[in-house]
Amino acid sequence: MGIDFSYEFYVHRRDVRRFLTAVADLCAPRSEKWTTVLLPDGTSVRLPGTHGFASGTTVELAGSDQLGGTFDLSLSFPADEPLRAYRDAMSDPDGSSRIMVGYVYLSAGETYAVLPDHWRFGFMPAVNAQSQLFLMSPSIRETFATLALSTGASLCLLDSELGGPEIIVTALGQRVSTQVPGPCLLWRPRGHSREAFEELSSRLAGQPQDPPTWIIGPEHPEFAAEVDSIADYAQVPSHLWVGP
């Protein structure tokens, strides 16, 4: 699709139910299509939306390294300027305080989790206009940051298919990248995810590694070039990146 941004959440097994319940609360409230998600503890969560575009199915999360297909969701975000412009371009404005964005594809699995005993959940929009919103809408950034912080997610990243660093949104219960392009931190593990997370943990505890290896902040000599690369790739003016 050309531009591809996604929010990635790394959630401990014990918090998966809490996480998916919060995701359900963000979905279209009057959706007539539902998917039942069976959890490892034998309980279930009902998500408003489809899985592989099929409604009324039961998807078992337990014992699966990577689910086949994705959950197909419409997510509701508080209105802000970028979201209003998106809605007005898609349909007549209705004055509502929340704006639906869909489809947003939710993938789930253990295979690519960077931490032991964690599940990786990835939210990816369906089209270019939505993908740009994932980067430049303060409301979307705040909603996903709140989702991570309220459900105990160990790490939340804003990723792109560019293959460069990811933007660290939250980590270990802390809001990290409160503004983009700055101040923010970039995640660049390059196959060393555990070491990168340890470096990030030390930095958040006030003991930054010197020199940094995997975590790129504004003081890093490569920071400006990396941010410019993301801006060029996204085709979004950097002044629209400002987030909560």
Image (tube, grey):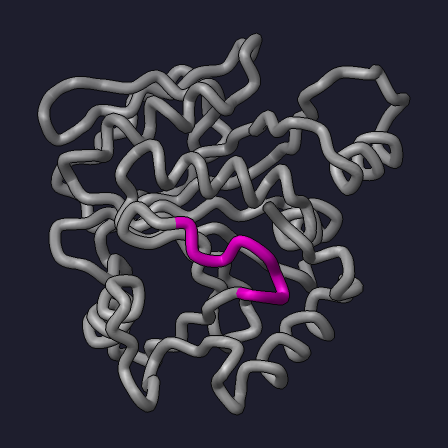
Instruction: Work out which residue is located at the far left of the displayed protein and give it.
Output: 41
Residue 136 shown left or right of residue 64 in the figure: right
Q: Is residue 242 magenta?
A: no
Please name whichever residue, 112 or 235, is drawn nearer the observer in this view of the structure.
Answer: 235
Instruction: Give the quarter of the image for residue 78.
Output: top right
Residue 119 shown left or right of residue 46 in the figure: left
Instruction: Work out which residue is located at the far front of the displayed protein and give it.
Output: 206
> Residue 47: image x %, image y %?
40, 21
Residue 127 in the image: above or below residue 205: above
Residue 230 in the image: above or below residue 73: below
At x 23% / y 34%, what residue is drawn?
Answer: 16
At x 52% / y 91%, what residue is drawn?
Answer: 221
Residue 193 in the image: above or below residue 140: below
Q: What main secondary structure does the magenta stretch of the protein show?
A: loop
Residue 93 shown left or right of residue 117 in the figure: right
Placement of the N terminus among the 4 image quadrants: bottom right
Q: Bounds of the magenta span? A: 175-183
At x 70% / y 70%, what residue is drawn?
Answer: 231
Please name whichever residue, 244 or 18, is drawn nearer the observer in this view of the structure.
Answer: 244
> Residue 141: image x %, image y %?
56, 45
Instruction: Give the quarter of the image for residue 61.
Output: top left
> Residue 48: image x %, image y %?
46, 18
At x 68% / y 54%, what residue is drawn?
Answer: 242
